Image (cartoon, helix red, strand yellow):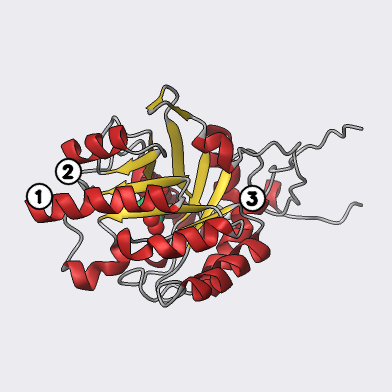
Amino acid sequence: MSTTFTIDTATSRATPTPAPMKRLTVPAVQGRKIDGVTTDPLVMLTAYTARQAQLLDPHCDMLLVGDSLGQVIYGLPSTLAVTLDMMCAHGAAVVRGSYHSLVIIDMPFGSYEASPQQAFASASRILAETGAAAVKLEGGQAMAETITFLSQRGIPVMGHIGLTPQAVNALGGYGARGRSEAEHAKILADAHAVADAGAFGVVLEGVMEPLADRITAEIAIPTIGIGASARCDGQVLVTEDMLGMFDRVPRFVKRFDNIAETIGNAAERYAADVRSRAFPTDDQVYRPKN
Ligand code: KIV
């Protein structure tokens, strides 16, 4: 029996009801790269809230609940203070707001590095509490055993190599990686380690373009680039970056809008209307019927 649902996104007070659910699966994402070639690039954006997910979902293959929410939502100086509680709360909201995309949730710093067992406890909590289908974790060779441990126990893992923001203190900043021969060799080895360990995909962040191309050509799983190469199997951006929410535009970001200006202008007009008592008007107040 099939049931038709509608999703009510009419107002901020609406209760969204699920649309017919046909989510992209992990094997479907992996299957987009056939014999080393992806003809239909994978589209991924970050999402942190239900309404944002509703708006992005029809256009994306994957929604990433990134730990970048630490800076974007919480105003933290880095991703290091992001907690499992935060990831679970935002992850569940994004799952509730999406019907088509595969939802992937970042494992926060300190929740997985100690051992495969620690990683399993954290990842299983994330999947159980959010309803998401996969997790992402940072690190290459050092995380290979953990990726295998999780994958073999039914937890799909996306890797993340190159510029790994959780390692900002060790890396000394957020600069692109792979400039020196040693770094180049390390990132290449990381890519193979992550793929061989059983990850279903890997984010290449801030990686020199020729290296990203080489990795994409050499490994069987899809590469998702951010500041990497147009020839990666897919691309990801932090949604607020591509919407123009922030003043600084890093080299790897393309702005598709200027939402900061739109919000600022709307707030300015609202404030003026409140101060001049032009808002609310008769149209926005309730009056008893005579
Ligand atoms: O946390 C995040 O948003 C990410 C993307 C930048 C890939 O990891």
Residue at the disc numbered 1: 179
Label 3 SS: loop
Callout 2–callout 1 Cβ contact below 8 Å: yes
**Residue 140, horizontal then vertical, whole percent:** 32, 58
- The residue furthest left is 180
> Please, what secondary structure does the residue beneath circle 2 have?
loop
Q: Is residue 143 among the parts visible in the rendering?
A: yes
| Amino acid marked by disc 1 | Arg
- Counting residues from the start of the chain, the first of labels 2 and 1 encountered is 1
Q: CA distance from mark 2 to mark 3?
A: 56 Å
Task: Tell me whether the residue at label 2 lies in contact with that at label 3, contact meaning CB atoms closer than 8 angstroms.
Answer: no
Mark 1 near ligand 1 (CB under 8 Å)?
no
The residue nearer to you, when weighing 220 against 267, is 220
On whether ligand 1 comes within 8 Å of the CB at mark 3, the answer is no
Name the side, left or right, on which 240 lies relative to 231: right
Relative to residue 110, is residue 208 depicted above or below? above
Residue 281: image tag: 3
In the picture provided, is 157 more to the left or to the right than 248?
A: right
* 98 relative position to 107: left or right: right
Rendered position, 32 above or below 87: above
Crowd tier of the residue under label 2, counting other residues whose Cα lies within 10 Å: few below 14, some 14–19, many 20 or above: some
Of badges 3 and 1, the one in the foreground is 1
What's the CA distance linking mark 3 and mark 1? 60 Å
Describe the element under mark 1 as helix, strand or loop.
loop
Residue shown at 43%/45% (left/top)? 201
Q: Position of residue 214 (x, y in %)?
A: 23, 36
Q: Is residue 177 visible?
A: no
Residue wearing tag 2: 208
Along the horizontal axis of the image, is 217 left or right of 64?
Answer: left
Q: Amino acid at mark 2?
A: Met
Which numbered disc, 2 or 3, marks the residue that appears first in the sequence? 2
Q: Dot 3, crowdedness within 10 Å: few (<14), some or many (≥20)?
A: few
